[in-house]
Image (spheres, coloured by chain):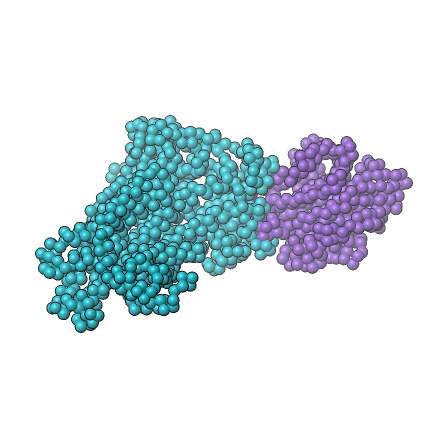
Amino acid sequence: MNNSGLPPLLWMVGWRYLVRHPWQTVLMILGISLGVAVVVSINVANASAARAFELSTASLTGSATHEIVGGPQGLNDKLYAQLVDQGVVSQAAPVISQYITSPQLGSQPLQLLGIDPFADAPFRSYLGVNGALSVSQLIAFLTRPGAVFISTDLAQRYHLSTGDTIQVAVNGNTENAIIAGLLQPSDSLSQHTLDGVILADISTAQELTNHVGKLDRIDLTLPKDASAQIKTIEAHLPAGVSLVPIQSQESPVEQMTAAFHLNLTALSLLALLVGLFLIYNTMTFSIVQRRSLFGTLRCLGVTRREIFWLVSAEALVVGSLGALLGIGLGIILAQSTVRMVTQTINDLFFTTTVRDVGIPISSLVEGGVLGVVATLATALPPAREAASVPPQAALTRSVLESKAHRNVTRTALGGLAVIGAGTGVLLFPTNNLIVGFAGTFAVVTGFALLASFVMVALMLAAQPVTGGLFGTLGRMAPRNLTASLSRTSVAVAALMVAVAVTIGVNLMVGSFRYTVIAWLNESLQGDIYISVPGFSATTATTAIDPAELQAIEHWPGVARADLLNEVMINSPQGPIQVDSTNNPDVGAERLFLAREQSPQATWQALQAGSVLVSEPLANRLGIPRRGGSIELVTPQGARSFPVVGIFYDYSSSQGMVVMSLDEYRQIWNDNRITAISLRLAPGAQVDQVTRSLQDGMAKLGFSQNLLIRPNRVLRQDVLAIFDRTFAITGALNVLTTIIAFIGVLSSLLLLQLEKQHEVGILRAIGMTVRELWGLTMLETGLMGLAAGLLSMPTGYALSLILIYIINRRSFNWTLQMAIQPGSFAQALLIAVIAALLAGIYPAYKLGKMAAADAIRFE
Amino acid sequence: MIKRLPYIFSLVLLVAAGWGVTRLFQPVGSAPAQAKLASVIPENPQGYERATGPRNFQFPQDYGPHPNFQTEWWYYTGNLNTASGRHFGYQLTFFRRALLPVQSVAKRSSDWATNQVYLAHFALTDVADGRFQSFEKLERGAAGLAGAQGTPSFKVWLEDWSVEQTGPTAYRLQASQNGLSIDFELTDLTGPVLQGDHGYSQKGPEPGNASYYFSQPRLATQGTIQVNNQNFSVTGLSWMDHEFSTSALSQGEVGWDWFGLQLSDGSELMVYDIRRSDGSIDPYSSGTWILPDASTHSLKQTDFTLQVEGTWHSPHSGATYPAKWKVSVPSLGISLKVTPYLADQENNLSFVYWEGAVQIVGTVGGVPVTGSGYVELTGYAGSIAGEF
């Protein structure tokens, strides 16, 4: 600022103003800080989630460039020896990776990582530490059944030490493991990684997870240009086993979560946007308040440039303070957002074993810088305004207002143009989410620009009504608001945007929930559902013990048992979830987007080798409505399956394939079953059979723990997960509304305080305190009404965009729009109540003021 | 020396470098290193079988592994020439080490579970290029990754390094690493030759401080050596040593100098000196003279001398090795000048030792002979080895 050459005295002008108007300053800082806090907390949550993923999964792939992966049952472990003994691969490491829990380790998901210490060093050197383990511990690691290593941190946290026995639950079975040694991580990366890992020798991992004879993958390090080597390796792989670069393995997960993270970021930016309205409003107001001061300064020879820098410097100070406070608040908020985001990611996408990754400093800095820059950018128009007025005009207060009035129509037209442009951007056929959000912001901003027009129109319409109801005061209120349009319209716009976001998000979530319920009704036709408890809320990929399965199928009261096997199968487009079922009614028990045949014929087509795909998969892979096909890697090599129907599904945004169980078993030679749906004989009671199954499985001595749920409970569980997923959306919504509330509060406060002398005169000529309250409340109520009314079309437009464009692009699924009139009424109510609440303090303060004090300025 | 003195391997093992737990088959090395390691690694020969007296060898079973003994190795070295006289030396060695005595091993269902660990060294001396390269691999003796068998036919392997029997006296030896590869047919010309007292080789005064030791000292060798995509057809002679034992440490021994010499008259001479920390030669040092008809003469320490006539300072480890010898067995009229084909044949692996091809000129009973062989020198870079 020094190069601007501001005289020190001028600094005092700015300083004195901020100090003399503490309320204004505090509210401004609060507005900025809340906006920044929301951005920071979401930023931290996203970064933590990304980091947790990186540490949970990605970093455990170590320095591998490629990996060999098999079909749904993993790889035959003999393959590794064949490749190594024939010299086909030189740097390779076998890996078993399974999620487990242990009651002694907090019952949280942990990754049981089975490695070969003889081969693993080049891949995950950070897992070990030079010389920390004694040779006898290493010997135990290799030779002792159930021997595992965990990190010293993990051991300390749960008060465990070498030699202790822990129970590990794997795929519903419980096994004993023994801690053969503690790993002392050499750096913080390995520390975080090891925090969620139980390390075992391949042999031990095979035994603990009941995977004897199997590997989950073989890691390879290949040189950059290894196409010849890749060909050689591929020639040695049996059909159904593929060599894939690590990158393509990771990307589906990144894609999956990217949309989720981007949606949250957009929502947090919306909160900041509302905060910026507030800043703009307050800055504008402070300029208006000081127009005479600036006029005087200009008359005294202060240059435009100096006035501009003065206002900008004020904004910088306020913005910086707000950003700092916002970072602090953001860190506090992040405690909750991180938990909510991690929970959702565990529910829907992948299991993270890493907790508490620490607050990424970059997220804080990002949020802070964004806050300061945004404040400065928002303060720019008022600063220019302050600098641009000629000295004599600055002394007349009415210039700005008349300018605002002249601009009403122009602003409204501009708003319509921005809405049009935003709509154009949204209709542009692309799957790019950033473009989608840019269009959304444009539409919302366009609606906000209509605020002043709506205000003028509403006040014109309201005047006769309020006049009829409240007499003089009733006519005064609308006129007052119109007279100070330059400030009231911004406050209304801020409140309007916040309320519109509430409406839009509510409509979207409501429609989503409605759609999910409709989908559940169609798809959950069984009476009782059985699966192995896992870590993902939406998938069941652990096999049910065949003996247990047989017992269940013949349980008294069970009329029919539909079996399901859910597996991940490799395809040229990456791993795809494949559900195979023997339910002949599958053609009728789904909501179809497109179906080539009757339900009966659909089942016959499935039996003959055709498949069904879910809408997200069809959209993701570009499978046409009719006549499409999908390629999957089978043990006999890649094979194309005709698609005979596309069904709506909301369990996986990555999508899935449904095929007949017989067909699947024939191709993949995999007889496992991961879920059972029971239909009961007429007269059998669902709750009774459920209880007898739950008790019976334990009595029969089956060790595998099964999740046996009646239809009703499963439905509740699914909806509970759904609500959990949107908890963060709701929380953000509330925060946005709070920011808008502060915006309205501050602008009303300023508006009313500014009218001190006017109120003084009114009081002097006989206005009662009661009447003063009435006037204030009427004014704020009208503002709330204006915001509420404008928020309705805005919110509706926003919900349309969220449902038909953002969700479609983010998650590939179509939601059914379900209008809930309640949302609109609720939004109007929120707007009016917020506005009325914001009027209380100014009314109280003005009412307390003695008329003489109020007019002392005169 | 890794080779002839089993107790070296009583200090174990393992696991791969960088996993943070590098403790390969540790050599004894210097006394401080010994003490350091002894404190971490409980020396526990209890439960293992021990070499306590002459043994009734059964072939072909005894070509295979003896898992009841703690340590075992199969040691192949050889000198080969191309038709144009380009000389190569090679070493391919497999070490086996038991982690637990057989009766202490828990029953496991995974094929990967094991109590046996294998280590292998592969080295190639290219005299014309003046180049020596050596490599090391470590594996579990399970899941088909490494192992040994005596019947139905002999085989020892670690990943893609292997020696496999292909006929009653025929073997195929293969190894490749970093662009070097060898692929040889070996034909056993003598059958197994038992060293020491009918294969019982005593290394110290303590009972059980001994090994079972036999050799195939004359393996006619032909095959291919590939160096940087260049193929060389070679012929020559290889030597195989197979030794197994369970032994405790002997005090005061720092290393050994071992010689396996193949002479042009069809005889072989194997001698070794065990060096003590006081500079003396251990009285249990010994040797064998193998005549062309495979009959043997045992040699006591007092029967031969290994006189050092030159030294070489290793730029890699800083150790100074003897580099030229006069080997004499006065009672048999043997006097041989032994010179390394290449000075630098130092194995800088998990433990540092010199193992190299040597050239021989001399006389046996006054008749001039020439020949090639292998020499192994350990304990010279002990202080460094102890740091691994």
Q: Locate the N terminus of chain A and report the quarter of the image it occupies.
A: bottom left
Residue drawn at x 17%, y 61% as measured from the top left: A777
Residue A647 locus on image (x, y percent): 32, 35
Say whether residue B47 is visible: no
In the displayed structure, B138 sits above or below A473; it is: above
Residue drawn at x 48%, y 33% as measured from the top left: A240
In the rendered image of the structure, the colour used to display chain B is: purple
In the displayed structure, A11 sits above or below B182; it is: below
Q: Is residue A294 left or right of residue A129?
A: left
Q: Residue furthest right?
A: B366
Q: Which of A55 and A695 is in front in this view?
A: A55
Q: Is residue A218 left or right of residue A322?
A: right
Q: Nearer the viewer, residue A613 or A13?
A: A13
Q: In which quarter of the image is residue A278?
A: bottom left
Chain letter for the cyan part? A
Residue B9 locus on image (x, y percent): 68, 50
Residue drawn at x 37%, y 41% as measured from the top left: A432
Q: Which of B119 and B181 is in front in this view?
A: B181
In the displayed structure, B63 sits above or below B32; it is: above
